[in-house]
Amino acid sequence: MSRILLVFLALISHWRRRPGNFAALIAGLAAAGALWSGVSALNGEARRSYAEAATLFSGGGLRSVEAAYGGLFSQEDFAALRRAGWKVSPVLEGTLRIGGAAYRLLGVDPVSLPADARLARAGEGGDLAGFLAPPGIAIVAPTTARRLAGVTRTDRGDPLPPLRLGPETPAATLIVDIGVAQMLLAQHGMVSRLLLAQGGDIGAPALETLAGGRLKLGGADETTDLARLTDAFHLNLTAFGFLAFLTGLFIVHAAHGLAFEQRLPMLRTLRALGVETRDLAGAMALELAALALLAGSVGLVGGWFVASALLPDVASSLENLYGARIAPALSFEPLWFASGLAMTFAGALAAMGDGLWKTLRLPPLQIGQIQASAGAEARRVRWQAPAAVVALAVAGAAFTFGDSLASGFAVIGLLLLAGILALPPLLAAALRIIGLRARGVVAEWFFADNRREAPGLSLALMALLLALSANIGVGAMVEGFRKTFVDWLDERLVAEVYFEARDEAAAARILACLRARPEIAAILPLWRAQSRLGGAPAEITGAPPHDTFRKHFPPLALEDGGWAKVEAGEAALVSEQLARRMGLVIGDAFEVPTPGGPWTTRVAGIYPDYGNPRGQLRIALDALTAHWPDVRRVNYMLRLPPVAAKTLVGELQARHGDDLARIVDQAQVKALSMSIFERTFAVTAALDTLTLAVSAIALVAALTTLGQQRLAQLAPLWAMGVDRKRLAALELARVASLALLTALAAIPLGNALAYVLVAVVNVRAFGWRLPFHVFPGQWAEVAAMAVVAAAISAAVPALRLARAQPAQLLKAFSE
């Protein structure tokens, strides 16, 4: 062990002499670890929040009684079951907006709550009288209490109950008495489910006898599985994190590869002094572990800051896409720490293990023969081109025959692999073709030297290609979604004012006022019920016959006379995600669970419903009230001249403020929708930018570590009369031209990625397909960004060359 330690001390002396190389290696490995561990922390925090939320109902193996058709049901059913001997406890669940953020509101009855429910431990907090007596108490987690400190009202204007800490309460959740919840959610007399104590139905009459098919008994695991629902989102995050991780490893591999070659004389000397291969390999393994531990620790700290910065946008995305709420602050998890460090060690072994392998394989004499990295890379070009073709063929097969989200990501991975394998051969071919048109000795030398030096920068250029391709692909998807989303909003949000009344009595008072106003052209009910379709909750929307819907509800597909059949109650319009989930096409018949039993209808059309995590049906208003007679009649849209919209909103708020749950005009709805859209994709944009930044670091690292070698190659030109400033300009042009060629290669690759994201990944992840768009302006921006990044990366070595003393250049002839 002492021999290994001595050899280890000799090896690390290299890093003292080459601080730039050491900094590049640590920066690459730390950046890779930071981005990977940051994404892991985000995913872990979200899944922990899901698990906490789920165990509120499933803890202790509790079952629940729910509406057979989905949605809410009357608390009279709870009273009937209790009188019949069923040991059930009512729960009302909903979303409450406070300070612009969404919180999960749980209303419980602490008197009947089963003792084995986790809700009983997170619930009234020991103050039963205060919990039940007006205005009640809201039990919250410490993080939620800090966020709501000083807040006294909800966004709708209702008074917020005093807060009390409940350490076992999930984040972004308020637990209140069920009566308080019914008031805050405007769901008087309604419940979401009945928790059933273990053995609570023994000896009691059958549920079918008591409820007549309106209710069903769910299993312990039948609560909404947010972890499953959001798997696609977290898989997207993981893919971005892994892409950034790989980009960072390119830096590590290039920096360590150069260090290995620079240390070959040292290794030869150590072997000549009698150091055995196993001792040398052991010292190199110890060095690898020390570097991984140092960089991994830095990466974990960086990952924590990355995750903390991105957490608000991740929370917003999950809320807007899936209705999921997660903790507003990260909590330390040992598993996250251990997995991040393990990933860093694995990455270090993958990136730096090549030098260790060479040390074990090469005999003592051969180990001292320096191989320039450019020459070694040039030899690899011979097999990279056919390997790229194979990867491309496998990607085509996966795209053609794959039918899952995993196959979509496999296609993306194979396309990126084909791209980075094909880049060196493509660069060599492009430089050769362009060089044939060169005129003049310096120009011919420039392209010949570029071909020779390109392999030495290939790893950095591969990292740049990955980042640029991801930037183009993700950017095209997001911009295409934005364009589609804006057009869709313009079509769908045509009513000038939308409002929701607090209850039906309030709605009647508001409608009486509105009918007396001559400027209002139409008052259109837009009522909603809940059901379960395709194994998941679905929303049923009923609307009356009107040109507003016929002319401004763009379908993806509609049969002849489809609108007439929908308005007659003979058919339904189905959202795209629901149609894909259930495998429905135009003309298909399907059953819809309703309070009165299954209702069979058919598909008259399919329409896009971007951003809605739930499936949706659009049916006639008369059909809705016939099958859901208890539907809440509180949602309306108003048609009137746009110039009168703001005035009407202000007057209704002044006159009927207590009757309104919410009221917005068209401009507010669109602004809010676009704000949600931007926050939803903020995480994607941030990770994309970070990946591009890491690739720029890779280029800086490669140019810095190769800078000294370039002096020896440029000295003969200086000796032949080319001044140092011109040599520096040529160096800048060399790196910029390689970056530009890389950017040109990234354009088709990025658009291929965008198509896969739109046609496969987006469909499998969210249930809808977007039109594919190309954005040439974005290509120009990415190319310019690549050239600027390359120029900045090459600026320091070029400046050093421009200021190099003649003695330094002359010294190159003596080496």
Image (tube, rainbow, N blue to C red):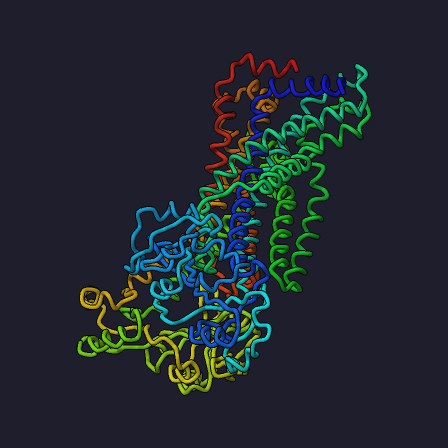
Q: Quadrant of the N terminus?
A: top right
Where's residue 30, x and y in %? 56, 34
Horizontal side, residue 315 vs residue 753: left or right: left
Q: Quadrant of residue 638?
A: bottom left
Q: Quadrant of residue 460?
A: top right
- In-front residue for pair 528/668: 528
Identify whether 229 is placed above or below 83: above
- In-front residue for pair 452/665: 665
Where's residue 121, x and y in %? 49, 54
Q: Quadrant of the C terminus?
A: top right
Identify whether 801 is placed above or below 561: above
Residue shown at the point (60%, 17%) measured from the top left? 17
Residue shown at the point (80%, 28%) measured from the top left? 362
Where's residue 236, x and y in %? 55, 53
- In-front residue for pair 701/325: 325
- In-front residue for pair 775/162: 162
Identify whether 263 is placed above or below 462: above
Residue 441 appears in view: no
Identify whether 627 is placed above or below 140: below
How many numbered marks appear? 0
Residue 596 appears in view: yes
Horizontal side, residue 476 vs residue 703: left or right: left
